[in-house]
């Protein structure tokens, strides 16, 4: 699982009115210092002068201690989220700067799939909506750059999705809200993922969850494993079985072979 951090609750944000439109900007700072001067001393003024709502910064390692100091300065009307590579604290580094005058900062969440290189920031915006900002500082050399982008694409996505995508996944047959199903479909298309069990069992009717009699005893296959298209040929033994522990869900499983190992058996 990626790192998830929730910023400290700021009571001053209660009732804060956020802008319906915001200016977003990105800047590679090329390090934190220049001729002995801390470039961060200019960030606050840059955000204010340019009326920036969200500023993404790359190549600026900022430790947790530094971040906490900036965020605790009285009157410092920006909120900072940062990510560094603990193995190389003086290199890489990405930061998101939020202008408190334009956006609320209570409830911000950050996910760090690649520390110091990629950080997803989820920022509450208008009413119940959020804006998701993925900040990237990709490696320079071609091989590392390719590996970086491949790293952001999961080979497997395993979950209780709580979404019915097709009629075969539910008894009695039904599908969920079209917008919900479409959002998941778009994510799968973008990440090139497919339902491995359904691919191997195109017409089978097996379910992983059963509602209680009070809830109507309906059955559904909401527990699924999605697999990247490139890895699909190296998978086998897609199965749904009792888990052997007390739960109202079935166990879903598959066996994945390394692409670098010789394949033995039939495909």
Image (cartoon, rainbow, N blue to C red):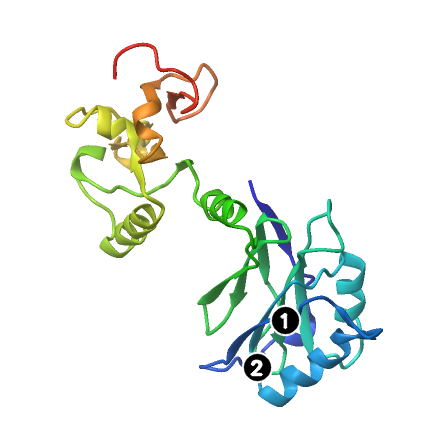
Q: Residues within 10 Å of mark 1 (few under 14, many from 20)?
A: many
Position of 142 relative to 30 (above/below): above
In the rendered view, tell whether residue 82 sits above or below residue 146: below
Seen at 55% across and 55% down, the residue is 138
Q: Which residue is mark 2?
A: 52
Residue reaching furthest to the bottom: 49
Q: Where does residue 222 sit, x and y in percent of width and height?
A: 32, 35
Residue most extreme to the top: 265
Q: What residue appears at the point 59 percent right and 53 percent down from the top-left corner?
A: 117
**Depicted 29 relative to depicted 200: above or below:** below
- The quadrant the N terminus occupies is top right
Mark 1, residue position: 97
**Which structural element holds mark 2?**
loop
What secondary structure is found at the residue carrying circle 1? strand
Residue 116 in picture, x, y percent from top left: 64, 53
Q: Are marks 1 and 2 in contact (CB under 8 Å)?
A: yes
Q: Quadrant of residue 251?
A: top left
- Judging depth in this view, the residue of 186 and 12 nearest the camera is 186
Q: Foreground: 222 or 75?
A: 75
Q: Position of residue 143 (x, y in %)?
A: 51, 45
Locate the C terminus by quadrant: top left
Between disc 1 and disc 2, whose residue precedes?
A: 2
Query: Which residue is depicted at the point 28% across and 48% down?
Result: 185
Q: Which mark is residue 27?
A: none
* Residue placed most toward the observer, 108 or 45: 45
Position of residue 122 measured from the top left corner of the image (x, y, whole percent): 52, 61
**Residue 218's quadrant in the figure?**
top left
Q: Residues within 10 Å of mark 2 (few under 14, many from 20)?
A: some
Q: Is residue 148 left or right of residue 10?
A: left
Q: CA distance from mark 1 to mark 2?
A: 9 Å
């Amino acid at each position: 699982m990626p790192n998830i951090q929730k910023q400290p609750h700021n009571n001053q944000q209660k009732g804060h009115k956020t802008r319906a439109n915001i200016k977003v900007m990105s800047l590679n700072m090329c390090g934190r210092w220049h001729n002995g001067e801390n470039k961060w001393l200019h960030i606050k003024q840059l955000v204010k002068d340019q009326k920036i709502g969200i500023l993404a910064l790359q190549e600026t390692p900022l430790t947790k201690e530094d971040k906490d100091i900036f965020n605790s300065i009285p009157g410092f009307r920006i909120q900072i989220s940062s990510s560094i590579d603990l193995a190389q604290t003086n290199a890489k580094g990405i930061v998101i700067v939020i202008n408190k005058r334009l956006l609320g900062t209570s409830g911000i969440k950050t996910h760090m799939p690649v520390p110091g290189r990629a950080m997803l920031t989820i920022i509450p915006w208008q009413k119940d909506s959020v804006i998701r900002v993925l900040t990237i500082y990709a490696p320079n050399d071609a091989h590392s750059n390719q590996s970086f982008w491949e790293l952001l694409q999961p080979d497997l996505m395993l979950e209780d999705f709580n979404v019915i995508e097709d009629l075969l996944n539910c008894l009695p047959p039904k599908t969920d809200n079209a917008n919900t199903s479409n959002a998941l479909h778009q994510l799968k298309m973008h990440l090139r993922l497919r339902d491995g069990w359904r691919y191997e069992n195109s017409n089978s009717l097996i379910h992983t969850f059963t509602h209680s009699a009070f809830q109507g005893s309906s059955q559904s296959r909401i527990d699924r494993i999605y697999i990247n298209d490139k890895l699909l040929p190296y998978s086998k033994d897609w199965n749904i079985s009792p888990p052997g522990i007390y739960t109202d869900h079935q166990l879903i499983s598959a066996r994945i072979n390394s692409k670098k190992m010789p394949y033995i058996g039939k495909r």
